[in-house]
Image: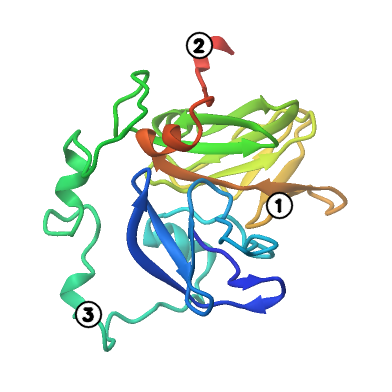
Amino acid sequence: MVYSARIDGKPTIFGTSGMLYRSNKLMYDRRPKRCGVHCSEAPYRPSGASRRPQTGDIPPWLPRYGVEWLAEHPDTSVLSPLNDFYRPIVYPREDYYKSTYYRYRTIPNTMFPVWNRDSRLGTKAGVLGVSISDSHIAYTVSTPRALRVVNDRVAGRDVVIVSSAISSDIRVYERDGQEFQLPSGSFDGRPAAMVDESGETWTAGESALVSEDGSTTLRRLSSNIYFWYAWFAFHPETDLYSALQK
């Protein structure tokens, strides 16, 4: 997750405490040394802070394959693995069997006991979590990957989800009553555009859906991908999307 590191208008330096809360990392503000937990799309609130760190102009980020990212951002900069902290060998792909958490992702067990579970999905099933107002809903990652476009309604608000078929590059936007579908000739990566029911093409940008003439924008909503047990631990009242109920 990426957040602005400003609290109450001041830059803040964060560190990791080495502690967990409901299997989620506890971070701390280095200067007043306040601890706080981060989970879901809402950043944590350190004790004593009058407001949370904000995402600001930083759009929600989800992992994607390099070819997908480079297609959209050919002039991107890459953080070098050559640094003073770890050797390059410490940074293998996460799907490589020698990566740090490869085995953890492939077994059903958790490192620490999880006090509240839900059997509707496997413990480590991947879900896209979306929160709007006080409503929370999870979509199994395989669902938007298979459907590519999901038109849904959450907490009385129309939303559309657009997904890559080959990675976790999944985005959620407002749709304001529009019904979207894939444009013709789409490829397996996340589509850069969608088509509404009238045939108009909308650009699926980093921060918003933009109509063909640029007169209308539908903002991107915050979302992220979690293990099912982690999402449920923080949102036990969550709904679980089912395409069969639509």
Q: Where does the image place residue 154, in percent across and percent down from the top left?
A: 67, 28
Which residue shows up at 22% across the image and 80% down it?
86
At which x and y percent is residue 60?
57, 55
Give the SS element for disc 2.
helix
Looking at the image, tell me whether mark 3 or mark 2 is earlier in sequence order: 3
**Distance of label 1 from label 2 (alpha carbons):** 28 Å
Residue, disc 3: 86
- SS class of the residue under badge 3? loop
**Which residue is pictured at 56% across the width and 61% down the height?**
46
- Dot 3, how many residues are within 10 Å of its Cα: few (below 14), some (14-19), or many (20+)? few
Q: Residues within 10 Å of mark 2 (few under 14, many from 20)?
A: few
Q: What's the amino acid at mark 1? A: Ala
Q: Is residue 84 above or below residue 43?
A: below
User: Image quarter for residue 116?
Assistant: top left
- Whether residue 151 sits left or right of residue 157 in the image: it is left
Give the amino acid at mark 2. Answer: Leu
The percent coordinates of residue 20 (x first, y second) are 34, 52
Q: For the view shown, which residue lies furthest in the right direction?
A: 215
Compute the Cα span from label 3 to label 2: 47 Å
Q: What is the number of the mark on residue 26? A: none
Bin the neighbour count of mark 1 within 10 Å (Cα to Cα): few under 14, some 14-19, many 20 and up.
many
Q: What amino acid is labelled 3 in the image?
A: Tyr
Q: Which mark is residue 244?
A: 2
Residue visible at 63% across and 73% down? 6
- Would you name the residue on which mark 1 appears? 208
